[in-house]
Image: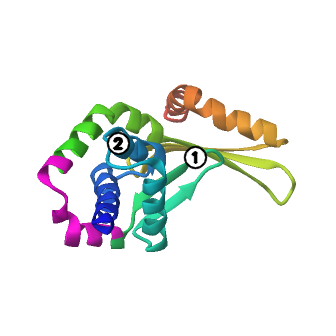
């Protein structure tokens, strides 16, 4: 029975990632599973580890957050075993995703990260996405890691303004 429950948690993760179709931060999925009383943090963390090891989900990490997406193998696994998820659980997940829609969009559409270059500077990369489609991508080479962190942190508040200004100036006749 415990193995059945553990497999259920993994199917829930796969189902959520399949429904959203965009990389999601772990926090969104953990919130659903733990707030609904399915299991605790450590058990769902272990389920994530199994899914990553089996290459059913993919992790991409920025300097401050990890995003998860479904792999082809994950989608095929869900197609094969997804019927194990009851209608009630699917409905509960669908309602949760509708309730958290704007939070999910905000967290998954603005991505920023940085890395050190060969020259010793830092390249901060900021992306505005709509689903898996990149609307706007900006890279800035800055002198210090502190500057790179500031660029990444300010991206969330300034992305819309920067995108609009770029569009106005670059599309001007």
Q: Residue at the spot x=54%, y=25% of the render?
A: 161
Q: Are marks 1 and 2 in contact (CB under 8 Å)?
A: no
- Please identify the quarter of the rendering in which residue 11 is found: bottom left
**Would residue 173 appear left or right of 101 to someone viewing this image?**
right
On whether residue 8 falls in the magenta region, the answer is no
Q: Where in the figure is residue 30, as x and y percent of width and height? A: 42, 46
Sooner in the amino-acid sequence: mark 1 or mark 2: 2
Q: Secondary structure at mark 2?
A: helix
Mainly helix, strand or loop, the magenta region? helix
Q: Where in the figure is residue 108, as x and y percent of width and height? A: 45, 43
- Please identify the quarter of the rendering in which residue 153 is found: top right
Which is more foreground, mark 1 or mark 2? Answer: 2
- Residue 29 vs residue 4, the one in the foreground: 4
> Looking at the image, which residue sits at the far left?
87
Q: Where in the figure is residue 57, as x and y percent of width and height? A: 42, 64
User: What residue would you read off at disc 2?
Assistant: 32
* Colour setup of the view: rainbow
Q: Secondary structure at mark 1?
A: loop
Q: CA distance from mark 1 to mark 2?
A: 18 Å
Q: Where in the figure is residue 59, as x and y percent of width and height? A: 51, 60
**Would residue 159 appear left or right of 69 to someone viewing this image?**
right
* 76 over 122 or under it: above or below: below
User: What residue would you read off at disc 1?
Assistant: 65
Can residue 4 be seen in this snapshot? yes
Can residue 130 be seen in this snapshot? no
Q: Residue at the spot x=58%, y=54% of the render?
A: 61
Bin the neighbour count of mark 1 within 10 Å (Cα to Cα): few under 14, some 14-19, many 20 and up: few
- On the rendered image, what quadrant is the N terminus found in? bottom left
Q: Residue at the spot x=19%, y=50% of the render?
A: 90
- Residue 45 vs residue 124, the one in the foreground: 45
**Residue range of the region highlighted in magenta in the rendering:** 74-89
Bin the neighbour count of mark 2 within 10 Å (Cα to Cα): few under 14, some 14-19, many 20 and up: many
């Amino acid at each position: 029975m415990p193995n059945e429950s553990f497999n259920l948690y993994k199917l829930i993760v796969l189902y959520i990632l399949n429904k959203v179709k965009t990389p999601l931060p772990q926090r969104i999925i953990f919130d659903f599973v733990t707030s609904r009383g399915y299991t605790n943090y450590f058990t769902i963390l272990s389920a994530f580890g199994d899914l990553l090891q089996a290459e059913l989900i993919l992790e991409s990490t920025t300097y401050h957050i990890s995003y998860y997406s479904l792999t082809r193998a994950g989608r095929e696994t869900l197609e094969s075993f997804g019927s194990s998820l009851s209608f009630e659980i699917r409905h509960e997940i669908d309602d949760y995703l509708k309730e958290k829609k704007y939070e999910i969009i905000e967290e998954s559409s603005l991505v920023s990260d940085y890395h050190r270059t060969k020259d010793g500077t830092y390249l901060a990369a900021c992306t505005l996405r709509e689903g898996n489609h990149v609307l706007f991508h900006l890279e800035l080479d800055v002198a210090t890691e502190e500057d790179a962190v500031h660029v990444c942190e300010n991206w969330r508040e300034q992305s819309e303004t920067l995108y609009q200004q770029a569009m106005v100036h670059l599309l001007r006749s």
